Image (spheres, grey):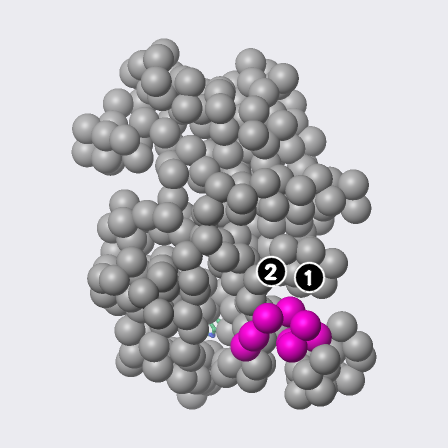
């Protein structure tokens, strides 16, 4: 297939004697949402950190957009178009929402070397418009002149998503995007993710909430004890007895 954005091949990663990732093979298609699920300690964060360059695999390769990113520095992988949204929002609480979103917009445009923090705050019209457009998309537009510290927890996570999307990533990695959210906030986030999916953004999402996973994913890979035990479209994964057993000790998902 030539529309593979991310290709993880034969990846192994051990911590001392513990095999956290054991021969991982994973392919993510362009424009799709690929969910990675699995019980606590299965290796999901280790896999995500291997993709973004925080960890280097012991063996195997990670190919992004046709080019090996194995062993590259996190900022180089980020510059190549892989952006991760963290579980805990990393925002600037004293700045307004608009300023928060303009900073990564500038940084991705100019690169970290030329990036000028103060210019970004009062900066160019096109960057401002780009930031406003993303905020409109995420339903944050009405609040753009408020300080980020005023926001609810759900809105802070949406702000972080806006800060990621404004960089126009080719691949967005979301680590539990609805963790700690109310059901209403979760549903709003699902609706937003569906909307940005329609714009062709490719996403890898780690999520514990099965309502979120089955509302969004085109493809699901199930990790257990460092290995992928099942990978396929949601209807295949849902009924798989091996998944039922490994994921929830026999409880049904
Ligand atoms: N830096 C590290 N040093 C040693 N062991 C680690 C390290 N990081 C992760 N591990 C171990 O590797 C295994 C996989 O951990 P990982 O955090 O990737 O799982 P996870 O699926 O993300 O779990 P959770 O859902 O609880 O976040 C676990 O047994 C964990 O204790």
Circle 1 residue = 214
Residue displayed at 32% across by 65% down: 2
Badge 1 density bin: few <14, some 14–19, many ≥20, Cα 10 Å: some
- Are dots 2 and 1 in contact, CB under 8 Å? yes
Residue 40: tell me if it is visible. no
Quarter placement of the C terminus: bottom right
On the image, the x and y values in percent for residue 159 come to 55, 33
* Prevailing secondary structure of the magenta residues: helix
Residue displayed at 59% across by 45% down: 193
Q: Which residue in the rendered view is the most extreme toward the left? A: 113
Compared to residue 185, the image places residue 22 above or below, namely: below
Mark 2: C-beta under 8 Å from nearest atom of ligand 1: no
Circle 2 residue = 217
Q: Nearer the viewer, residue 10 or 92?
A: 10
The span picked out in magenta is 231-238
Q: Nearer the viewer, residue 46 or 167?
A: 167
Mark 1: C-beta under 8 Å from nearest atom of ligand 1: no
On the image, the x and y values in percent for residue 189 come to 66, 42
Quarter placement of the N terminus: bottom left
Badge 2 density bin: few <14, some 14–19, many ≥20, Cα 10 Å: some
Q: Which mark is residue 21?
A: none
């Amino acid at each position: 297939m030539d529309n593979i954005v991310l290709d993880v091949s034969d990846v192994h990663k051990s911590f001392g004697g513990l095999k956290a990732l054991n021969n991982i093979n994973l392919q993510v298609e362009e424009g799709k949402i690929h969910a990675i699920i699995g019980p606590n300690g299965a290796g999901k964060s280790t896999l995500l950190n291997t993709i973004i360059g925080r960890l280097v695999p012991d063996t195997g390769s990670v190919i992004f957009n046709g080019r090996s990113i194995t062993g590259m520095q996190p900022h180089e992988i980020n510059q190549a178009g892989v952006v991760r949204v963290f579980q805990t929002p990393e925002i600037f609480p004293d700045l307004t929402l608009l300023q928060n979103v303009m900073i990564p917009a500038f940084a991705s445009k100019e690169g970290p070397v030329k990036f000028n923090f103060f210019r970004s705050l009062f900066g160019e019209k096109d960057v401002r418009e780009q930031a406003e457009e993303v905020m409109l998309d995420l339903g944050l537009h009405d609040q753009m002149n408020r300080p980020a510290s005023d926001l609810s927890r759900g809105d802070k996570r949406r702000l972080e998503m806006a800060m990621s999307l404004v960089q126009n990533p080719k691949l967005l990695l979301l680590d539990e995007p609805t963790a700690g959210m109310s059901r209403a906030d979760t549903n709003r986030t699902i609706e937003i993710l569906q909307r940005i999916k329609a714009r062709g953004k490719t996403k890898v999402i780690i999520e514990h909430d099965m309502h979120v996973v089955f509302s969004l994913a085109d493809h699901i890979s199930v990790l257990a004890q460092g290995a992928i035990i099942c990978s396929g479209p949601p209807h295949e994964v849902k009924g798989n007895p091996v998944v039922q057993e490994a994921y929830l000790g026999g409880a049904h998902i």
